[in-house]
Structures are given as C-alpha cells and as structure tokens.
Image (spheres, helix red, strand yellow):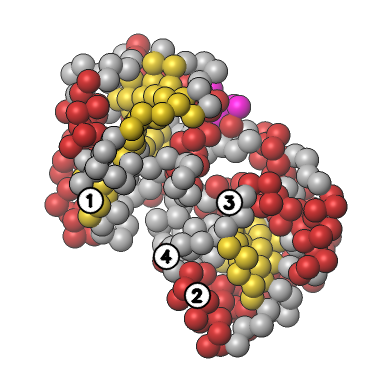
C-alpha cells in the first residue's frame, strides 16, 4: 500500500503537535507501507527529500493567509501522485481542496485534529465546501470520542468517524539518564512545575503566569512561539521571580525536565487545543497533569481525579489551587503518575495506534 499524508508543515523543522505527530506516524507506518508526505515548504521553489526512509515533498507556496498556505504546486503534486490513499490532516484548506479534487482517482480519509476556532469569519465562507470534503471522505479519524461528539462540524458525520488517539514513542520515554535529571532538579529545586510547548494564544500561559503569584515553587516554561515575548514582558512587569523561561528543548533534554518536575501543567483556554500530546508525554514519565476542562480531547488525555486534575480554563486561582493541592499531597501525586504511566503504555503507544490507523485505511480501500 502507498499512503500519502497531506498537511501544511512537517517536523523537523516546524515544531508543533500535528507536525510532530505526522513525523511519528510516518516513521511507524513506513514499516507497513510505502509512505509519502506532501506539505508546503514556505518557499516558492519545491524540493523533494528523503528523511529516514520517508519521501517528503515540500511544494512551493506563494504566501500564507491566516496561517493557511497558498500553494498551486501542492495541487499539482496531489494530481500527479498516485498513492493508494490520501490521508489529509485537518484543519488544512489547501490539502483538503487538493484531495477532494482528485477523489475520483484516489480515495481519502480525514485525520481530524481540530475544528477551526479563531478564524470564524473565513470559516463561515469555507464551511459549505469543507462539509462536502467531509461528506465524501471514506472515513474521518478524530483523536478522541469527546471531540467527535462535541464538534459542530462532525455532528452529521458521526457514522463516518473512527476514533484513534494520538500516540507517542513509549519506549523513548521509558528510560532516562538519572544524573541529568538530578542536574535539572539541582538547578530549579526538587519540586518544580513544568510546561513545555509552542507559545500560542490558546495555550493559556498568561493564566499560568497569573497563577504564579499564588505559587511558592518554581514554574519552568519550555518551548518558544509567537506569544513568548509578550509573556516575558508580563513576567518582568509582575515581578514573577519564580517563573523561568528555558526556551526550546531537544527531545532528550525534555525528558530530563519531565522526570525532574513534580507535575506538568497544561493551562490551555480554547477549543483549538484538541488533544494535548504534551499531556501524554508527561504521563509517560509518571507525572500527573493539571489541565483544563475544554470539552475536547484534553479531558480524555488527562482523566480528572485519576491521572491529574482538570480545572476551569482561564481561572488562575483555580489553577493555582490544583497545583498547590498536588504539591502538598505527594502520595496522591505519585499514585496519579503511576496510573497515568500505565495508561499511556496501554492506550497511547504509537506502535499500536499506527496499526489502528492502518486498518482504517484498509477498510477505506475495501469500500
């Protein structure tokens, strides 16, 4: 079987949850099929390269409008490629248009990562066409049953949906250099709160900084992104001496922080946060998570009262109280972390989830 995954960006070099997942699913599915990845390259000239046995086609693009690439070349590649099936990762208008145009020659499934939340007016215009894309997909693959049931766009397509959660490399997170973990703890303290991810508006990091006023232990923030400068200015203005920005962390270094922290915090405030792969990574390291109640897969990734605590989004006081509770109750923290780690090994191992997705592709081809 030849599978072509379609999205706007790929990791590396672009850091993001969908980009990293696309890279990971391609890595594991290449053991079962021929994999091509079709993305945009943020430059006019296209290029085709091989990354770890995966052919990645970077189509040229003219510009980006509201984060969406304008790429006639992607339309060209989607027409000339002849995979057995397209897997378009959405939201991704140019990819959705490309696979829909070629639907008579190559069937497609939709890997449904998130609704469009922020660009409401453009989405009102695009929605009628997008519904046609969903209607003619062989299957739609949401990341959680919660998101499937609460999405205003998926409501009429429930029978097409087949839920497969996002997966991670459990083996990668199962072992760590204890000396490196000790060095991280020595730098910040034996108990610190940790966040790592792209600094976007919906991540709610400004809420975390507000809650820092009521938290006595260090709050370490990893990652980078468009909101970082604003957040660092907020830290200086508020005099938050217990908040530390450490920048982007390579995967190996990320593990040291995940094993070294007391708990992971995930304060997202908008439905754009559809799942939260960082939650699963923290759980894989045996750490409970304080996350938020968004009515999305976040509440499936972090089970309230079982693998962590979920609080009202946008509420710094409630966020601080949940963090304080877990810090003051190490036995509960440890038990939640243990349950979380066992659950990740059972339900979120990419070795298993990549096979589940593959079975859906096969069903699509047999329709």
In this picture, residue 187 sits left or right of residue 81: right
| Disc 4 versus disc 3: nearer the observer | 4
Q: Looking at the image, can residue 133 be seen? A: no
Q: How far is the residue under mark 2 from the one under mark 3?
A: 20 Å
According to the picture, the residue beneath numbered tag 2 turns out to be 231
Q: Are discs 1 and 2 less than 8 Å apart at CB?
A: no
Q: Looking at the image, can residue 129 be seen? A: yes
Q: How far is the residue under mark 4 from the one under mark 1?
A: 18 Å
Q: How far is the residue under mark 1 from the one under mark 3?
A: 30 Å
Q: Is residue 235 above or below residue 310?
A: below
Q: How far is the residue under mark 4 from the one under mark 3?
A: 18 Å
Q: Which residues are magenta?
A: 351-356
Lower sequence index among marks 1 and 2: 1
Query: Helix, strand or loop at disc 2?
Result: helix
Q: Is residue 5 magenta?
A: no
| Disc 2 versus disc 3: nearer the observer | 2
Residue under the image location 74 percent in, 53 percent down: 256
According to the picture, the residue beneath numbered tag 1 turns out to be 63
According to the picture, the residue beneath numbered tag 3 turns out to be 278
Lower sequence index among marks 4 and 1: 1
Lower sequence index among marks 2 and 4: 4
User: From the image, which quarter does the N terminus lie in?
Assistant: top left
């Amino acid at each position: 079987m030849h599978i072509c995954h379609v999205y706007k960006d790929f990791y590396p070099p672009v850091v993001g949850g969908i980009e990293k997942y696309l890279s990971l699913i391609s890595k594991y599915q290449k053991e079962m099929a021929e994999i091509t990845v079709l993305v945009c390259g943020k430059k006019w000239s296209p290029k085709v390269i091989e990354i770890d046995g995966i052919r990645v086609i970077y189509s040229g693009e003219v510009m980006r409008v509201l984060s969406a690439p304008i790429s006639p070349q992607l339309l060209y590649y989607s027409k000339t490629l002849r995979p057995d099936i397209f897997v378009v990762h959405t939201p991704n208008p140019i990819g959705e248009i490309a696979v829909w145009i070629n639907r008579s020659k190559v069937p497609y499934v939709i890997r449904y990562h998130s609704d469009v939340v922020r660009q409401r007016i453009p989405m009102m215009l695009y929605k009628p066409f997008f519904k046609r894309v969903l209607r003619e997909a062989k299957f739609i693959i949401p990341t959680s049953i919660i998101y499937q049931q609460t999405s205003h766009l998926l409501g009429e397509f429930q029978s097409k949906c087949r839920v497969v959660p996002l997966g991670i490399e459990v083996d990668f997170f199962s072992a760590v250099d204890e000396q490196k973990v000790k060095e991280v703890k020595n730098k910040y303290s034996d108990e610190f709160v940790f966040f790592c991810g792209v600094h976007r508006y919906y991540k709610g990091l400004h809420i975390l900084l507000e809650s820092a006023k009521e938290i006595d232990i260090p709050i370490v923030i990893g990652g980078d992104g468009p909101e970082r400068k604003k957040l660092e200015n907020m830290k200086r203005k508020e005099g938050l001496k217990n908040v530390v920005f450490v920048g982007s962390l390579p995967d190996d270094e990320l593990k040291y922080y995940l094993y070294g922290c007391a708990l992971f915090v995930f304060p997202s405030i908008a439905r754009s946060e559809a799942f939260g792969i960082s939650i699963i990574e923290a759980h894989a390291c045996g750490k409970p998570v304080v996350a938020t109640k968004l009515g999305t897969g976040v509440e499936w990734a972090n089970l309230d009262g079982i693998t962590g605590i979920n609080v009202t989004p946008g509420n710094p006081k409630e966020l601080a109280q949940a963090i304080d509770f877990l810090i003051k109750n190490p036995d509960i923290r440890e038990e939640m972390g243990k349950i979380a780690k066992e659950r990740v090994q059972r339900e979120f191992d990419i070795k298993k989830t990549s096979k589940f997705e593959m079975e859906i592709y096969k069903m699509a081809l047999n329709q």
